Each structure stands twice: as C-alpha cells, then as structure tokens.
Image (cartoon, helix red, strand yellow):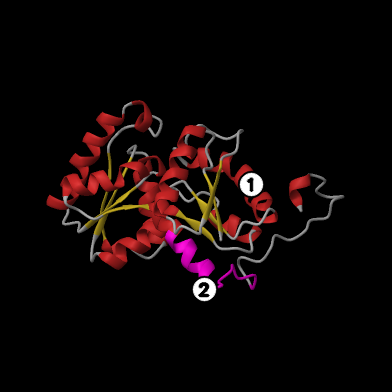
Amino acid sequence: MRIVLINPNSTASMTDQVRESARRNAFPGTEIVALNPADTPASIEGHADEALSVPALLQAIRTAEAGGGDAFVIACFDDPGLAAAREVARGPVIGICQAAVQVATTIAARFSIVTTLPRSVPIIEDLVHHYGAAAKCRSVRAIDMPVLALEAEPDLAEARLVAEIEAARDRDGAEAVVLGCAGMSELCERLSERTGMPVIDGVSAAVKLAEALIGGGYRTSKVGAYNYPTVKDRAACPMEDCA
C-alpha cells in the first residue's frame, strides 16, 4: 500500500521530519511518500495561511492519486482543505487533527491538546467541536512559539512542551495529550517518557488509520457531500482548475 503525506506548507525540512516519523510507525510493507508544494506559506498559522495552501494541496492529491496513491494524509494540524480534498480523491483522505482526536477519545476519557501559538487555540477548539469531541477535551494549550521555531530552538520547544503537558495533566485533568502540530511529531516518544503521559502524534495516528482503511478496502464515498467537484462550463470559467 502507498500512503501519500502532504505537508501543505513549503518548508522541506518539516516534510522530511514528517516522512521519517511516518516511516518509523508504518508497517514494513507500507510505502510512505511525502510531498510539499513550493508556492505555499512557509508555515500554516491561521485561516489565511490555510486558504493560501489549499489549491496546491488539492493539485498534489490529484497528481498523487493518478500516480498510484492509495490514501492521503494532510500533515497539518489545522486539517486545511480536508473536505475539499475528500471531494477530489477516491482514496481515503485523513487530517492529522481528526485522526489524533479519534485516537485520544479511544484511549482516554479526557484529553488535552498542546499547540504552538495562542492564535491556533480557537481554530483547534472549533475543530474538536466539529469532530464531536468537545466534551472530552479538557484544554487546548500553547507553548507560544511559532511553528518554524520548533526546528530553530528545539531545546526550548521541548522544555515548554513538557511544562504544558504536565499542566494539562495536573491542572486540567487530562489523561492523554495530543501534539497540535506536525512539526512536533519527532518528539512524541520522548515527551511521553519524560511526562509519563500517553502522548499522541497526529502524523502517526493518521498513518495507522490510513493503513487500516486501505486494508479494509474502504474508499471515500462519492454519494453526496464528497462527490467529485462539478465540471464547470469552460466558457464561463476558463481556468484549468475549474475542472
């Protein structure tokens, strides 16, 4: 099986990290392909960045599916363009936030999420509500560092993550913690060891879910909401991307 991870930002080093995290957790027979567009924001931090990343994300999925991709993972915790991606793909499309939340609600009665910047907190809170898990989410915390600082200042990022995970456990009553950024994926095991908490990385969660869906023969429904986009009249809409 071939799982295609798409990092919707343009930072290649983050894509490399996501690829390695996925490969460490995938079954031996699973092929992991990781892509990132060149003409998108360097990091996804807010609604505008999300919107700017989606057209290239959709095109990457179309191309990857034509090349034999069996399932697709959107490797950004905001799950940008997830519904649109499911329209253009026949194979399953998984957002790492949705996958991580599903794992968290399966292994713990209550959980928290630790993300990068405070501005991401309301976006993630809305996603958790949308995924039906608001009653089980005790908190969404932020380490107050931009996404790119995770790579530039790894020791400081890890120290702040440890502090917020312990606060989620001790103050909020969380029984598991989700890492709210794909750029944190390589720290998952170490953070769990340091805090004694189940720590969930959305990249790994999405890959394992993708393997299960492929193995079960499940594909995206084309009855209703996720049907392929309607082909537009080229006279009215001459752009290539209208089709």
210 is within the stretch colored magenta: yes
Please name the residue shown 53% across and 67% down the image: 214
Quadrant where the image shows the N terminus: bottom right
**Mark-to-mark CA distance, 1 and 2:** 25 Å
Q: Nearer the viewer, residue 109 or 206?
A: 206
SS at mark 2?
Answer: loop
Q: Residue furthest front?
A: 28
Give the residue type that dot 2 points to. Gly
Q: Which residue is mark 2?
A: 216
Q: Which residue is mark 1?
A: 60
Q: Residue furthest right?
A: 235
Q: Earlier in the sequence, mark 1 or mark 2?
A: 1
Q: Position of residue 203 (x, y in %)?
A: 42, 51
Give the residue type that dot 1 points to. Ala
Q: Position of residue 72 (x, y in %)?
A: 55, 55
Left or right: where 203 falls relative to 228: left
Q: Nearer the viewer, residue 139 or 15?
A: 15
Q: In the rendered structure, find residue 104 and report the number of the disc placed on it.
A: none
Q: Is residue 229 visible?
A: yes
Q: Nearer the viewer, mark 1 or mark 2?
A: 2
Magenta residues span 208-223
Classify mark 2: residues with Cα within 10 Å, few (<14), some (14-19) or many (20+): few
221 is within the stretch colored magenta: yes
